Amino acid sequence: QVQLVESGGGLVQAGGSLRLSCTASTVFTINTMGWYRQAPGKERELVAVFSSVGYTNYADSVKDRFTISRGNAKNTVNLQMNSLKPEDTSVYYCVAYLRDSIYWGQGTQVTVSS
């Protein structure tokens, strides 16, 4: 079983920045990790995904504002969020892909005030 622990959410004014981090607890090396988000009444959507083979993908709504990167510790992924907008307000979930399974974190709230 893989457990994901997220940190870094909070309340910020529009135009501000936040940095989310996620660490997966497993002896295996996870090559692909990412972030999804879900706002009230909306479906969960991909924010960004990172693969150790060099693949990254971003939602159009966050391109040029968010940056996903591998953390220094094993099985860690970070999401640097700049120029935040009120529409970025959501619960952000870390996701990890290992073999044929997908693992989710418990979610961290990001609230952007106007």
Image (cartoon, rainbow, N blue to C red):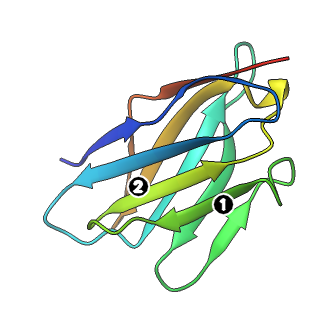
Residue located at (39% from left, 73% from top):
31
Residue located at (56% from left, 34% from top):
92
Q: Earlier in the sequence, mark 2 or mark 1?
A: 1
Residue located at (73% from left, 35% from top):
16
Residue type marked 2: Ala
Q: Is residue 57 left or right of 72 when viewed as pictured?
A: right
| Position above or below: 12 against 69 | above
Residue located at (85% from left, 17% from top):
114
SS of the residue under disc 1:
strand
SS of the residue under disc 2:
strand
| Position above or below: 42 against 33 | above
Give the numbered dot on residue 67: 1
x then y, percent, for residue 26: 17, 58
Image quadrant assignment for residue 104 = top left
Between marks 2 and 1 in the image, the one whose residue lies nearer the viewer: 1
x then y, percent, for residue 23: 31, 51
Q: Residues within 10 Å of mark 2 (few under 14, many from 20)?
A: many
Q: Is residue 105 left or right of 50 when viewed as pictured?
A: left
Residue type marked 1: Thr
Residue underneath mark 2: 96
Q: Is residue 11 left or right of 4 when viewed as pictured?
A: right
Question: What is the residue that sits farthest to the left in this orientation?
Answer: 27
Q: Is residue 83 left or right of 24 when viewed as pictured?
A: right
Give the numbered dot on residue 58: none
x then y, percent, for residue 4: 31, 43
x then y, percent, for residue 99: 33, 67
Image quadrant assignment for residue 56 = bottom right
C-beta proximity under 8 Å, tags 2 and 1: no
112 vs 30, nearest the viewer: 112
Marks 2/1: CA–CA distance: 17 Å
Q: Residues within 10 Å of mark 1 (few under 14, many from 20)?
A: many
